[in-house]
Image: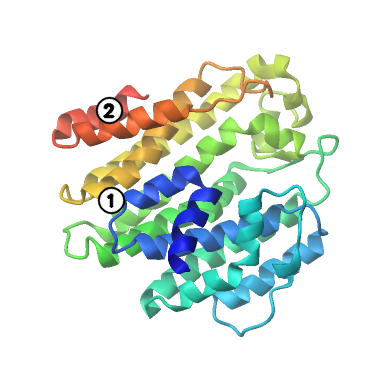
Amino acid sequence: MSDELLTSLLRDVSRSFYLTLRVLPGAVRPQIGVAYLLARTTDTIADTQIVPLESRLDALAALRRRILGQGAGALPFLQWREPHAAKPEQVLLARCEESLRLLEDLEEADRGRIREVLDTIIGGQELDLKRFNGATAQRIVALETDADLDDYTYRVAGCVGEFWTRMCRAHLIAEAPIDDDSLLRKGIRFGKGLQLVNILRDIPQDLRNGRCYVPRQSLITANLTPESLLLPENETRFRPVYDQFLAAAADHLAVGWEYTGLLPHEQMRLRLGCAWPLLIGARTLRRLRHENILDPNRRVKVSRREVHFLRLRSVLLYPWPSAWNRQFRTEN
């Protein structure tokens, strides 16, 4: 049963991450898989539209208590049925008790790492739900400052880079001569960079859901408002602001590539698992530099064929470090 949760269900709720998970060494694959299952469960709770805000917050709080091992209370969302939700997400909610049992079956130290990262993620989801409560395309709510954006990217993904680093350090590279503080800082920026790419790609869709992750103070410098970003013709005015965030994302990804290079060369599976999302993220940024990024009809997406090419190329180039490093530079 647990094999099914960590294979077919994981594949159904995230095909791209599942490919990364499959390449990871077996010593960390179950722990990272369990963490991802539970993170997707909390994300599904936060995103559901069939219950009011307070019920979602209560459900997240109940699941957080269970994840943290603080009692065995009932999970109120087990009976939720959202007709418009994809079937894998419905299964994810219905089988949450099984996911929690997988967590309890792990070693104590691994449970602690997973609990820490999920506590941070759930806190970010709760903050997002409260911040954007009532937001619509007619009433857009924006982050206020760059610090708010940085905090958001940490809660959503930077903490995942931190968790990933601690888990891999414990099980795969415990003896590697790497400065821990440096590796953790780079791991956090790795995660932030991937999330910032998603934000920059999804601006038109987020705006139409009433959410603006581009800070209001940055928009003011270009005499723009969140509402003005609904108009594709404002892309020229928005582009200087947008390019600053593109540059920040590119810097984060470059640090992520440095992170990958710090890992021992013999850890091929781990390095590939890090390299693939970075290469896809870098190619996405390259596309975003040349698109009208306010046009809701022109969503930038790296095709499956391109993803397959990037992965295959990285495997073929692995024996040659200089060629391996060049592949990241060619995507920028």
Rendered position, 141 above or below 13: above
**Amino acid carrying mark 1 in the image:** Leu
| Residue 170 placement (x, y as % from top left) | 28, 67
Corner quadrant of residue 168: bottom left
The residue at 60%/20% (across/down) is 239
Q: Is residue 23 left or right of residue 50?
A: left
Work out whether residue 256 or residue 79 is closer to the camera in this orientation and state it. 79
What is the basis of the colouring in this image?
rainbow
Q: Which residue is mark 1?
A: 270
**Amino acid carrying mark 2 in the image:** Gln
Q: Is residue 211 left or right of residue 188?
A: right
Q: Which residue is mark 2?
A: 327
| Residue 36 placement (x, y as % from top left) | 49, 58
Is residue 321 in view from this perspective? yes
| Residue 141 placement (x, y as % from top left) | 76, 42
Q: Secondary structure at mark 1?
A: helix
Q: Secondary structure at mark 2?
A: helix
Q: Which mark is residue 212?
A: none
Q: Point out the image quarter for the C terminus.
A: top left
| Residue 306 placement (x, y as % from top left) | 41, 26
